[in-house]
Structure formats: structure tokens, C-alpha cells
Image: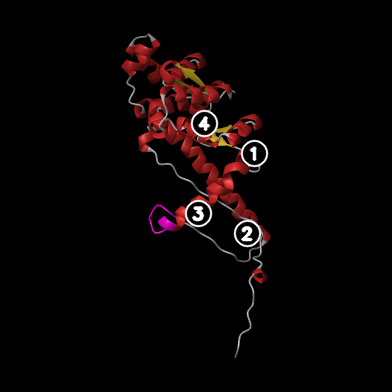
Amino acid sequence: MDHQNQNIDCEKLLKTLREVLKAKKITYATLAEKLDVSEITVKRLFSTQTCTLQTLFKICDLIEISFFDLASMAKQDREVECVLTIEQEKFFAANPAIFGIFRMLHRGIEPNAIATKWKLTSQSLFRVLRKIEKLNLLEVLPKNQIRMKAYGNIRFQHQGPLAKTILRTQIIQFLDHVDVVLKNDDVCLHSAELELSDTSISELVAEIHALGTKYRTRAVRDKNLLSPDKLQSVRWLYAFAPYETNWQQYRLTDQKD
């Protein structure tokens, strides 16, 4: 990478970092105190747009954002994923409630708030956190606080152990919910069976993938720029395949003229 491109990348990173600081309500003065430098030094860092990787990593650690998430937000064209291992999937498949708690922690919900919602004692919460820690997804700190090690959107295999345990049931629950709230402005459901050419099918599949990538990428950005109370949990389901309904599964009764 040439010197000019390095400057452009640093400029993008620092601009995005400034947005994160603003969203987290962290002032230059507060950041300077955390870095043990003067406020003028911090201001100069952003104004000259020159910063070492070591300093960037340190700032990210202090404000609790992954450097890789920051880089993805600056680039704005790459999805950040936390892909669960088979071992992690097997554990969560056997303990789906703990997976639910992990998802809440990953969203930024405070452990004490989770304990209240799940009616957990401090000891019970600690045991749950330790089990997740053993999966290398977070680090347990004093007083049941945590430091996440899992960054980006959580992904697991479509036909893996976790999906086989929870996915089909949750899809049915989701569709039942959509049926109830379908008239709301923030809800949509589209279903069709028609005929398309091979070219149109390829275009549609590509657009569906692109749409999913776009909003999974935006989810990472929103999560790092906004507090959990400013975000709303959403779910979408895309399913497309060459398919013809078997109408003969329905019994044809004799019709009298």
C-alpha cells in the first residue's frame, strides 16, 4: 500500500472513530484522561489525521469497540461476522437458554439487567457467564461484568447442531408473529409463485444476497454507534428456490354440475 492510500485509510478510520466517540458521548477530554495524555494531544491526533496502529488499538480497547469492527465501519463494504465453531454450536444446542443470554450480552445488555429479566441470582449469573467464557466468547470480570471477545453478527451453520435445535421452531414462531402484526408500517411479507427465466432467477438471488449483506453490515455500524436502548431487535427471513407447489396433495372432491 502506498503512502497516499495509507493516509486515506487513516483518515477514514479516525473519522469513523470520531463518530463512535460522539455516539458513546465520550469527549476528547475524557479520552485524553483514559490515554493519560493531554487533551491537546488528542485533538492534534484527529486534526492531523495521523495515528499509529498501536494507539488506535489502545483507543478501541478503552472505548470497548473492536478495531476490526471499526475498520469495517470505515470501509462500509464488508460484513463482520462471528461464526460459531461446531463445539460452540453443540454446547448452545444443548443449552439454548444460555445462547439466548449470550445473544443479549452480545447486543450490549448489561449482565445485571439480564439477571433481573431471567430472575437469576448473582451466583447463577456468574455460573452462566463462566460457561460462556469457557467457549472463548467473552471474559468474565469482577462483579459479573464482562468483556466481549465475539464481534460482528453471530452466524451459525444452517444445518448445524444449533440450527437443528432452534431454527425451525423459531421460524414458525416468527411467521405467526408476522401474521399478527402484518398491518404495521414496519412489517412486510411477500410471497409469490410465478415463472422466471434463468437470467431473472440469477439476478433475484444476487439481489437478495446483497440486501442481506447491506443490512447485516449496517447492523454492526448501528450497534457500535448507538446504545442498546436506541436499537430494536428485528428478524427477516428470505427463502427462494426453483419450486412448484404440489397441488395434488389436496383431495379433489366430486363436483356435481
The numbered mark at residue 161 is: 1
Q: What stretch is highlighted in magenta?
A: 180-188
The numbered mark at residue 215 is: none
* In-image side of 213 versus 26 (left or right): right
Q: Which of marks 3 and 4 is nearer the N terminus?
A: 4
Q: Does residue 79 appear in this view? A: no
Q: Earlier in the sequence, mark 2 or mark 4?
A: 4
Q: Earlier in the sequence, mark 2 or mark 1?
A: 1
Residue placed under numbered mark 2 in the picture: 200
Residue placed under numbered mark 4 in the picture: 72
As measured in the structure, the alpha-carbon distance from the residue carrying label 3 to the one carrying label 2 is 27 Å
Q: Quadrant of residue 154?
A: top right
Q: Is mark 1 on a helix, strand or loop?
A: helix
Q: Residue at 43%, 30% (x, y): give it.
A: 108
Q: What element carries label 3?
A: helix
As rendered, which of 158 and 231 lies closer to the eye?
158
Name the quadrant of the N terminus: top right
